[in-house]
Structures are given as C-alpha cells and as structure tokens.
Amino acid sequence: MPERSQNDRTMIEISHVTRSYGAFKALDDASLVIREGEFFSLLGPSGCGKTTLLRMIAGFDNPTSGTIAVDGQPMAGIPANRRPTNMVFQSYAIFPHLNVEQNVAYGLRRLRLGAAEEKRRVEEALAQVSLTGLGKRGAHELSGGQRQRVALARALVMRPKVLLLDEPLSALDKKLREQMQVELRRLQQAVGITFILVTHDQYEALAMSDRIAVMFGGRIAQVASPKEIYQRPVNRQVADFLGGMNFVKAEIVEENGSSLVVDTLGFGRVKTEKPKAFVRNGGGATLGIRPERLRVLWDDASSKFEVAGRVIERHYFGEITHLIVEIPGLEKPLSVTETNDFGADDIPVGAPIRLAYDPDALVALAD
Amino acid sequence: MTAAAEGSQPLSLGRRQRTSLLQSEAAQGFALISPTFIYALVLLVVPILVVVAHSFWTQNYLTIDRTFTLENYRIAVTEPIYLDLLRRSLWISLLVSFFTVVLAYPIAFYISFHGGRHKGLWLFLITIPFWTSYLLRVMSWKVILGYNGVLNSGLMGLGIISEPSTALLYNTSAVVITLTHAWAAFAILPIFVSLEKIDRSLIEAATDLGDGPLRRFLRITLPLSVPGIVSAILIVMIPTVGDFVTPKLVGGKDGVMIANAIQAQFGKGANWPLGAALSVTTMLVVTAMAASTVLIIRSAARMAR
Ligand SMILES: Nc1ncnc2c1ncn2[C@@H]1O[C@H](COP(=O)(O)OP(=O)(O)OP(=O)(O)O)[C@@H](O)[C@H]1O
Ligand SMILES: [Mg+2]
C-alpha cells in the first residue's frame, strides 16, 4: 500500500484537556497534536477516557478545563452540529425510519445541493464503502458489516476535516473486522481525511494507524508510531498492553544522556537506549523483551547472545507455538513465541533449551 | 429439527406429534392466555354480538320482534338529528384527541428527555389527579368554568371582563376542555414510551450531521415517536365518541353527543334495536375515522424526510 505523503500541518490541537465528573477525572490533562491527513488511534483499556476525548472533539461534551482546536479554530462554544468533524458511532446509529440512501443523504439535505448533485455524492460515498446498489435497502435489512459501511458513508459524504470513529469494528466478527481494517486504512489513504480511531484492540491500532496515543486512567501515556510504541514502550503498562512482554529485573550500572547500562541475572550486562520518559527510581529498572524476539537455538547452533533454560509449558496456536521457559536466576519464566516451521511444536516439555536474542530488542522501562 | 427427529422414528410418529402439539409454544401461549381470553370473549365479544343482533330486530312495545330488518339502520343514517349528533361527536372526539396529543406530547417529551433520574416520579405525579373519581373531575371543571366559577372571577378580578361570561360552560368547548383534561395521562404514557425507545445516539448522529435542535426534532424524534402518537390518538378518540357523562354534565344543549341519544334509546326511548343500530353505526364510523387518521399521520411522517 503506497503511503500517502502527509504534511506536518496541525489538524487538531488538544491542550491540557481535563474532564471531571465530580472528583473523578475521566480525562486528566491530556495534550495531543494530530496532523492533517493522519490516521490517528486512541488506544487504551476500557474506561481510560477514549470516548470522552472523542466526544469532546465532536462537541457532544465539553472539557472541564483546557482547549481543543480543529484546523486552527478553537472549538469552545461551537456546538456539535457546526463543527467540521463527523462521527461513526459505536452503535452505528443508523436512522431506522430511513433507507440507506436517505441515511447517507441525511446531512447533505440541509446543504441544498440540488437533487442531481446530492444523488451524485450519495452514489460516490456508497461506492467508496462498496455498497453500490444497496441504496434502497431499509435500515433493518442490513448486516452488521453493511450497517457499519452505511455509518461510514454517511459521515464521509459530508467531507469533514476530521472523521471520528468510536470502536467502529468492535461489533464485527474477527474475519470481517480484519477485512474492514484493511479497507478502512485504504479508504483513509484515498480520501486523505484525518481519521481518529478509538479502539481497545492493540492489533487494530498497530495495523491501521500512522500514530497511536496510548491512554491509561485518563492520562496519555505515550504518543508514537505503531512500531515505536511496540518496540520502545515508555513504561511497563504500555509494554504490557501492547502484546506480551517479558520483564526482567535489572540493576542500573551506568546512566548517561541517551543510554543505560544495566546488569541482569539472565541476560548479563546490557547497554540499551534510554527511553525519553525514563525516570530513575533508585538503582533498579526493568528490562523488557517481546516473546517473539527470543529465538530457539537448534542443535549446535549458537549465538553471541543467548540464555539457557528448560521448557516448562508448551501451548500450540496453529501457526505459532508458545513456550514457557524457565531460566536459572530469573524470578519469572520467559515466554517465547516461535513459528512452527522448524518444529517448535514438537519441543518436549522439560527439555533443555537455548534462546538467542538481539540486545537491541531489550528495552529499558521505567516502572 | 423436529421434522428430522420424527422422520427417524416413523413408528411413534402419532404420539410424537401429539406431544409436540401440546408442547408447542403456540399451545403453551394459548393455555397461558386462556383465562383472559375467555373473560374477554364473554365480556367483549358476546355483548357486541347481542348489540349487533338487536340492531336487526324491531321493538314492538314491550316485546322484540325478531324478524330481520334494516329499518333501524335506515333511521340511523337518514334521520337528520342522528346524523347531526354523529357528526358533532366525531368532531368533538377529533378535537379532543388533537388537543390531548398536542398537550401531552411536550409533557412526555420533557419527562423523557429532561426527566433525569426522576422520570418515574414525574409519571407518578401526573397520575395523581386520576386517583379521584371522573365525576369529581368533571364537577371541578364545572366549578372552574361556571357562571360564578374560578375562571369568571379571575377574569373579572383582572378587569378583562365586566360581568360573568356564560360562554364558558354548557357548550361544545366545555366538553372538549373537560375531555382533553380527562384523557391527558392516557396520551402521555404511550408517547412517553415511544420517546423512551428512541436511541439517543440517533439524535447525536443527527446533530453530528449538522441538524440543530428543531431540525433533529422534526426529522428524527417526531417520526420515530409516531407509534406513540398513533396509540395516544386511538386511546383518546375511540372512547371519546361514546362518552355520555361529560356532555350531560358540562355540554348543555350544544354539547349533546351521539352516546346521549343511544343512551336515551336504551332508556327512556325504550327502543333497543334503534339504540343498537346507532351504536353499530357509530362503531363503524369511528373505526373508519381512526383508521384514516392513523393513515394520514403515517404518511405525513413519511413525507417529513
Ligand atoms: N456521565 C458520566 N458520569 C460519570 N462518569 C463518567 C461519565 N461518562 C463517563 N464516565 C467515566 O469516565 C471514564 C472514561 O469513560 P470513557 O467512556 O471515555 O471510557 P472509554 O475509554 O471509552 O472506555 P470503553 O473502551 O469501555 O468505551 C469511565 O471510567 C467512565 O466511568
Ligand atoms: Mg468508549
């Protein structure tokens, strides 16, 4: 898929936004800049404030403090119906008394484009979401996936500056969801509109986004590209939320501007890149390594960097096998994900095993 | 499923069918509603049949001649007095259902959309006036609208009128006002229920697509509450046509309705067959009027896209 060239123009600027419900802060001092044409995801566990933030951008809710600007224009005091944003609701909110065409034309009707132009734009939007020919279908005659597409077309047809999507795929089954992820990304590239996607599914966020903001408990923990979020999470919480991660206790030996030297029991002395948000808390730190960055060393193969241990559990997942490996000296066993092409699914439980790793795959994490 | 299971054991087919009939959902449902069903049959269908039968007979002083005749219907639909009463009754019930719904809608809307956590309390408060007898409520309207009534005293106190108006009581509008008040709660409830059923995200979606409060009310809330409006109208319109207490108490000479004439035929007039024919005619006309009102509202809602 060719990457659409993005510019660096700011489309949305969220600064120090807090939303309180009494003493409880659903959103706590969130600041964020989203660029024009970007596919941006808000990722976090249930209740972390993603929907709250999205609804404030759409204008359905107002910050207790802080400001939101869309395309340079402050949004305070502008009601939802006059904001240059459109939303795809989690429930899709398809108008039940209107057919597909009338649903899609709903927002256009007010613009008085004339029947021909309105029809042309509706057709165009339906084509964009592959619903051509279903215009006369009633709202109740649609499958979940089709409803999702209608909701998408209805918002896209308005040509908003920003399209807001609140967990648009969560109601679909796995296969359709994966197909829609690809389609949604392709669509975004084609129309060039800034998309903000709310999701609690880390794979969805990783697969679709240009950048991701990871949120916990109303706070934004990290904003970065999928690759960076996955490979260089800023803390244990982010690392843990984005797939599995082995955590290894470490002693800090040396700390300078950009790097960190630590001692671990299993992995020995390691020099790693120091994360931006690293805050030293005494002499301890945590090293993390993703299960798929540990490779099984077969027979007499060897690696400059390896650890040895014993397999204590094996879980088969079709294309991969999950091994739990006990390493002498480590308080917790390591999980290892290995593809099955070399027979990892045949490794007996209890067998001795050696694992190779790339020291670059070790990340230092602030606790 | 059942067909396959039966097919595999053809020998016990007969027995299986019987049990499956007894256990079928329809049969169970029927068993469940049968007490109510029998009750409804005895108290609704039988009286209607009795009335319909009478309408084809003739009153012969104290006895009833049971030979079939359409004479009663001829009188019912040609005699100017009955036509006039029927027309007036329909007009009054149309007015009453219109005003009731127009007044009930905003109340139902307010409770549904702005009632917050106290919706139940609001609905409860609305039903309080209905704990008193209907007659008492009609009487209190007499007190309000009467010659020395609250309204006249109030208007005189404000200097708007110099002597009590007699235009308030004993006429059609007094009947309409009293009935509108009497039916308000019955109209609020179905409208409230249909408003409650509207998914609030639909209204947000309309807002998101650019509609202000008025537009989204006209394009989303109102069309989706049509079922409630329709039930409210039916609930009010049908019994109103047949009301005879209200016109008797506050209607005076102008407010007489068809039910008063029917009552007279069954009472003083002692002509049951004519009364029955008037009843049946009224029922048919009301049904037609209610059906066409429903159709008009439905198509109006469809147009409002
Ligand atoms: N009206 C409200 N009153 C009080 N608390 C609220 C209100 N709305 C939301 N919250 C709280 O704010 C927090 C954030 O809610 P939000 O809906 O933004 O979560 P979310 O990240 O979208 O979660 P999910 O993935 O479950 O949709 C939650 O803890 C929620 O309980
Ligand atoms: Mg949410």
Image (cartoon, helix red, strand yellow):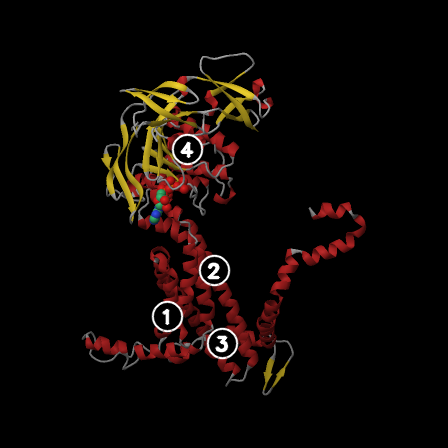
Mark 3, secondary structure of its residue: loop
Amino acid on which the number 1 mark rests in the picture:
His
**Sequence order check: which comes first, mark 2 or mark 3?**
3
What is the distance, in whole Å, between disc 2 and disc 4 at their CAs?
39 Å
Which is more toward the observer, A322 or B95?
A322
Q: Which residue is mark 1?
A: B181
Q: Are marks 3 and 4 on the same chain?
A: no
Amino acid on which the number 4 mark rests in the picture:
Ala
Left or right of residue B9, residue B124 in this image: left
Amino acid on which the number 3 mark rests in the picture:
Glu
What is the distance, in whole Å, between disc 1 and disc 2 at their CAs?
24 Å
Disc 1 and disc 3 in contact, CB within 8 angstroms: no
Chain containing mark 4: A
Q: Are marks 1 and 2 on the same chain?
A: yes
Q: Which mark is residue A125?
A: 4
What is the distance, in whole Å, between disc 3 and disc 4 at their CAs?
64 Å
Which is more toward the observer, A104 or A310?
A310
Badge nearest the viewer, 1 or 2: 1
Chain containing mark 2: B
